[in-house]
Image (spheres, rainbow, N blue to C red):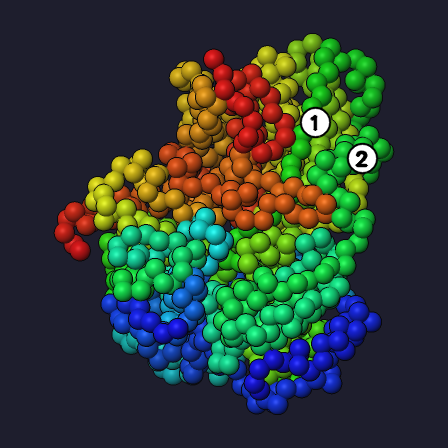
Amino acid sequence: MAFDLNVNGTRHTLDADEQTPLLWVIRDHLGLTGTKFSCGIGQCGACTVHVDGQAVRSCSVPVSIAAGKRVTTIEGVSSDGNHPLQVAWKEFDTPQCGYCQSGMIMSALALLQRRPNPSDSDIDSGVTNACRCGTYHRIRQAIHMAADLMKDGRR
Amino acid sequence: MSGNRLSDFNRREFIAMTAAAPGAFILGFWAPPQANAQTASPRPVWYEDSSTPEINAWIVISPDDTVTIRIGQTELGQGVWTSNAMMVAEELQCDWSKVRPQYASANRDAREKAPEWTLNVMGKGATDPNGGGEPGFGNRDRTGVSGIPDTLYRRMRTNAASSVKDGRYYLQLAGAEARERLLLAAAELWNVPLPELTAKDSIITHAKSSRTTTYGQIADRARRIPHPNPEKIVIKSPDQWTLMGTERKNLDVPDKVAGKVVYGIDVRVPGMKWAAVKSCPVYGGTVKKHDFDSVRQMPGVQSAVQFPIPDPALTRGRVFSGGVAVVADHWYQAKAALDRMPIEWEIPAANAAFNTSSMRAALLAALDRPGRVRVTQGNVDDAFGRAAKVVEATYSTPYLPRARMEPGNATVLVTNDRVDVWIGDQSPQETRFSASKITGIPEQNVYVNLCHLGGGFGRNGNGPQAEQAIMIANAHRGTPIHLLWTREEDFVGTTYRAMGMARLKAGLDAEGWPIALDVRTAMQEDGFGPESSFDVASRYYVPNYRFSNHTTKFHVPVGTRRGIGQAAHEFYRESFVNELAHAAGKDAYRYRRELISRTNLPYKDDMIRALDIAAEMSGWGNALPRGTARAIALEERGGETNRMATISAMVHTVSVSREGKVKLVRVDVAHDTGFSLVNPLSVKKQIEGQITWFYNDAMHQANTIKDGQIVENNFRAFPLSRIDEDPPEINIHFFKTGHWLLGMGHDRATSVQSAIGDAIFQVTGKRLRDLPYGGHDLSWG
């Protein structure tokens, strides 16, 4: 069926089964491949995007839940790759393979929107994505740095 | 071509044919209408651009001074994209900010031989700072899967923590050769003597005449000037390095944080169809029949392709499974149809009889049989007769997969005269060989287009995703096929580190020092690294020592998972030393220190230094709160010889709550740099990552076998730790040694395993010897 989807501020008219996972509409129909597929059961969070500002594991929800709402993917976080989270991520040279990092940044962004000055335990409970390379140590530092940058009003 | 492909063609004939010729999957008589339409392949990858002067096979310099450096290994998070470039750029003396990596062409590698000047390693081996170290190149074997010593880019494998240790000398040479030719070009242009020129940051200066030029301006001239005597080129030793040895951020990180990096899964080729795959969940099984007719009307569905067990000659002898793919316009359509398609399997009864409990019993039985004795020193049996105390312990480690975040995938286009494979691959030369064997198209016409990998952890190229995709695409010549495994399928398609057991028995004298040590390890016969960590000599002094391997036959395809046998063996060894120290009533750090000092191991001073530094960093001996304990361990690779080696020691501080919750709270790391690291920042990240890796091995992860099948096949049953389990404090101290490093990408932080076990014992009195520790009742008090 045809329906409208607003992704990163752009309206798309799509023809896809409404039960199609949101992830595959984003990756396959819209060609936005920054959002990753990994477990397919909402466990790992590599597919995390925002729907109306809420972090959603897009592999496990039908595209229909996003109809009429605002979807944000990693490609929509900033136009220049310099959102404070991205700046902080670069500062700590955070990614290794990088595959989980889009989802990780989307989770961190949702956390910072909820809690602009997160404690370590806020991070523990708010960023529950999996990273196989073990970049957690730098992710934590990067989130704290991003919070500081955002407080300074740079974004 | 519209609608269904192979299925329309004649599914019954197809099945009959694969049954008649297992392992020889050829459909020469089937050709779709557009089979010849696409030979020039689109190149969707982001790093491609080549219209500029190539100085040598590794270096292209464009007029704007951009230096493109070709990378022969695959970036999978270890930082090779940056460290390989650093090794070239150090010698090239170019402006680092203008460096842009690009994957080397595996096709060109099939067509060209390596330059003569890269074939000989200069210097005197592991302990010569001026030389090339001791790269390990084997001879190419007849199946094409190992070795490959003299093709253009030498080894294109990314394995065994070898990218720096094997590649350094020829990457430095490549940079130096290009620099010398750029200087020659400037000397010729200005008609001045070569020694009067200097090169720095991509600028060549003739001080006497105050003239300068840039690499970009002179590159076109330089490419036409051969080096007069390339065999005389000398590479810089670490004391001359200015770029190598400094912390450099990884060059692909800006793209990674913007979601722009193209992994294999992201490849899009015009006309591409998607394939979802189901292989027989019991290894060695095949498809008896499948009912494509029942799903062919589902949206987007095109065809089904049944495929045999990938030829073991292409997968290092491993026997995976046969299976069936559904091909559709979109992957989720293919998957939806595959999920609904009835499939009957042909399952070998012997393989279906394997269960973890029976396999464990078989390994235990193997430990009791005579094994392959690899080391005998002194008289072990006599010495046990004199022992004041005998300590014996049996340990086990489970099957473990890579479980990289990016599920296995490959995009393949086969036409009648060419194969293109787009893949993140740790062994593109082997994939090239597979593509040629399966399609009958010569390797010179196979293009393995490398992509970044979403995690590697051990030569994933030997899983059969490429072979499956090539078989499917070969049945759809002219149509690019993007195969993608589900997570569940990835657990079937990966290779596993072999399940293992070990029985260690020591006789102690009245003072608690070992006088006899009998080490028996058991794993399936094709497991990797059975000799690790115990071979040649005991790392801890014992006058009477025997080490034997014991094997049995299992059906699980095993492979080079991060750390191979060593990760398990260091767990056995260091756990047992902890038990000996406890039995002797001695401090586990000082006990180790004394035993190493009594050996004549060539690098024993480095081992002691590692222990001393780690102990001091950790505040070893200082009081800790109740419920918290420290444990120390030695990690070494190559420590038994005077060749290349990597040595580290770690102290892990671990708390166990009264409720039994384990927390790794702090890690203190003392790590050998050899003569020098190339990119210390990448090494730190690798150490941090391996702490997480082996923490997962210690606490959470195991694959069990039921009725011949892998049971845990997604991240619910096979958990990955999250940020809440990350140690809040990691301290890393590097110390310099007098040898080249044997790599550090896959067997650092194995100590997490033994250390958590020992800390649990110190706190709770419970000695756990089977990994993982999670799931046990560890409450106390």
- Output the chain of dot 2: B
The correct choice, above or below, for B189 with respect to A148 in the image is below
- Output the chain of dot 1: B
Q: Name the residue located 73 percent from the left edge and 23 percent from the top edge.
A: B505
The correct choice, above or below, for B396 with respect to B486 in the image is above
Cα–Cα gap, marks 2 and 1:
13 Å
Mark 2: few/some/many CA within 10 Å (<14, 14-19, 20+): many
Q: Name the residue located 26 percent from the left edge and 43 percent from the top edge.
A: A144
Q: Residue B342 falls in which quadrant of the image?
A: bottom right
On the question of residue B313 being in view, the answer is: no
The residue at which mark 1 appears reads as B394
Secondary structure type for disc 2:
helix
Position of B494 with respect to B520 (left or right) is left
The correct choice, above or below, for A110 with respect to A64 in the image is above
Give B318 or B299, whichever is nearer the viewer.
B299
Secondary structure type for disc 1:
strand
Mark 2 vs mark 1: same chain? yes
Give B306 or B318, whichever is nearer the viewer.
B306
Across and down, in percent, residue B408 comes to 56, 60
Residue ranking furthest to the right: B370
Q: Earlier in the sequence, mark 2 or mark 1?
A: 2
On the question of residue B297 being in view, the answer is: yes
The residue at which mark 2 appears reads as B366
